[in-house]
């Protein structure tokens, strides 16, 4: 496990982080997002989707729970589990996505913690006021720990 911190002073800084992680993502990658309503989980997901070549509009999946997109580089699975009970989430068979051909982002991921693969990149977005956000990253598993180390080396944890 490894940690990194990314200070976004503007929305563009959040987008830049999403673009970096999108460039590193491979099939089966999982980003688990948390943070209060309005923190920027959906905004981050939109930037990520665009960076892996999803064309068109990526909406919040709050009401649809799961949306699938064909990105130019990878399929993208976007989930928002806020309205689901653990039992309901379990019945969806999420492993099909987590271990599929694409990349998954889960908003409110900690609500279904026990259904998530051990290996994942956790992002906690904290609203600091205005456009400012602190994004705390925890890389679980070798692959994501490596991402955190790379981010720290870039001087992300200002
Ligand atoms: N640094 C930032 N990072 C992400 N979103 C930001 C930032 N600054 C302002 N915003 C705005 O904050 C809002 C975040 O909303 P959203 O992504 O839907 O939040 P969540 O999905 O976490 O509830 C968007 O309107 C976005 O444009
Ligand atoms: Mg959202």
Image (spheres, grey):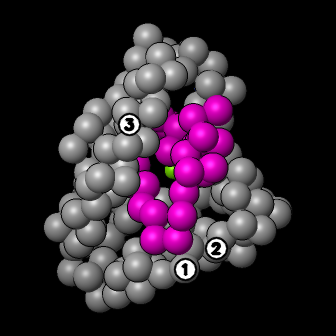
Give the magenta part as a residue range: 16-44
Image coordinates of residue 15 in percent, x first then y, are 65, 35
The mark nearer the N terminus, 2 or 3, is 2
Q: Pointer 1 and pointer 2: residues touching (CB < 8 Å)?
A: yes
- Residue ID for mark 2: 75
Locate residue 98, reporting x and y percent. 40, 74
Q: CA distance from mark 1 to mark 2?
A: 7 Å
In the displayed structure, 32 sits above or below 158; it is below
- Magenta stretch: includes residue 39: yes
Please name which of the two marks, 2 or 3, marks the residue nearer to the observer: 3
Q: Name the residue nearer the viewer: 102 or 154.
A: 154
Residue 109 within the magenta-colored segment of the rendering? no
Q: Earlier in the sequence, mark 1 or mark 3?
A: 1
> Does the closest atom of ligand 2 sit within 8 Å of the Cβ of label 2?
no
The answer, for residue 65, to whether it is visible in the render is no
Q: Nearest the camera: 136 or 62?
A: 136
**Secondary structure of residue under mark 2:** strand
Q: Quadrant of the C terminus?
A: top left
Q: Badge 1: few (under 14), some or many (20 or more) residues near its Cα, within 10 Å?
A: some
Q: From the image, which quarter does the N terminus lie in?
A: top left
Which residue is painted at 43% across and 55% down in the image? 31
Q: Residue furthest right?
A: 56
Distance between mark 2 and mark 3 Cα atoms: 23 Å
CA gap, disc 1 to disc 3? 23 Å
Q: Residue 52: which disc?
A: none
Q: Which residue is mark 3?
A: 148
Which residue corresponds to mark 1?
101
Q: Quadrant of residue 115?
A: bottom left
């Amino acid at each position: 496990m490894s940690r990194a911190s990314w200070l976004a002073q503007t929305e563009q800084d959040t987008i830049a982080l999403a673009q970096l992680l999108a460039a590193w993502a491979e099939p089966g990658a999982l980003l688990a997002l948390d943070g209060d309503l309005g923190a920027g989980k959906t905004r981050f997901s939109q930037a990520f989707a665009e960076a892996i070549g999803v064309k068109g509009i990526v909406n919040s999946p709050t009401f649809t729970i799961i949306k699938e997109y064909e990105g130019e580089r990878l399929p993208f699975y976007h989930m928002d589990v806020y309205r689901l009970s653990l039992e309901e989430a379990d019945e969806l068979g999420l492993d099909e996505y987590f271990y599929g051909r694409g990349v998954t982002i889960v908003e409110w991921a900690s609500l279904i913690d026990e259904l998530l693969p051990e290996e994942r990149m956790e992002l906690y977005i904290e609203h600091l006021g205005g456009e400012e956000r602190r994004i705390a990253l925890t890389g679980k598993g070798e692959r994501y720990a490596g991402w955190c180390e790379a981010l720290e080396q870039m001087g992300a944890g200002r």
